[in-house]
Amino acid sequence: MLDKVLSMIGMAMRAGKVVSGEFAVEKSVKSQKAYLVIIARDSSDNSKKNYEDMCKFYHTELHYYGTKESLGAAIGKEYRASVAIQDENFAKAILAKLEATEN
């Protein structure tokens, strides 16, 4: 089965609306450019807590999805523990897919 969430992340990446990696995601959230942050489920607990605290403080939507390997593959890079979506429409579309897979 084709993963619709990862496909949407890939489309957003090709449109130049995704940043990945700890430093870039943190900068995106703190500058309020990120509409959605996605963290790999196999990230360390420490990383998850840092992102949770930061996203809560800056009122940024946060979800856990996939693995470091699958997130990296979706954006055409090596392992990625985190990605930030910097486009409101892509973020809404990805959120809809996330909620559909969670239900």
Image: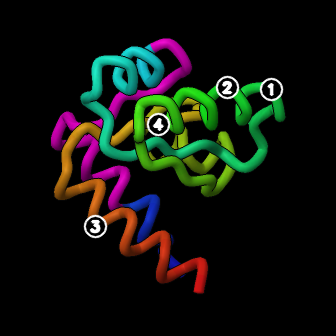
Assess whether mark 2 and mark 3 are in contact (beta carbons under 8 angstroms): no
Q: Is residue 45 left or right of residue 81?
A: right
Q: Which of marks 3 and 2 is in front?
A: 2
Q: Which amino acid does label 2 sit on?
A: Asn
Residue drawn at (71%, 35%) of the image: 48
Residue at numbered disc 3: 93
State the count of labels: 4
Q: In this view, does 75 lie to the left or right of 78?
A: left
Of callouts 3 and 1, which one flags the residue occurring earlier in the amino acid sequence? Answer: 1
Q: Nearer the viewer, mark 4 or mark 2?
A: 2
Tell me, yes or no, whether the highlighted magenta stretch contains residue 11.
yes
Secondary structure beneath label 3: helix
Residue at numbered disc 1: 46
User: In the rendered structure, which segment of residues is drawn in magenta?
Assistant: 8-23
Q: Which mark is residue 11?
A: none
Of callouts 1 and 4, which one flags the residue occurring earlier in the amino acid sequence? Answer: 1
Q: Which mark is residue 50?
A: 2
Query: From mark 4 to mark 3, how far is it between C-alphas?
Result: 15 Å
Residue 81 in sight from this viewpoint: no
Residue drawn at (62%, 53%) of the image: 64
Of callouts 4 and 3, which one flags the residue occurring earlier in the amino acid sequence? Answer: 4
Assess whether mark 4 and mark 1 are in contact (beta carbons under 8 angstroms): no
Of callouts 4 and 2, which one flags the residue occurring earlier in the amino acid sequence? Answer: 2
Residue 52 in sight from this viewpoint: yes
Tell me if residue 59 comes above or below residue 101 in the rendering.
above
Q: In the rendered view of the protein, which quadrant contains the N terminus?
A: bottom right
Q: Which of marks 3 and 1 is in front?
A: 1
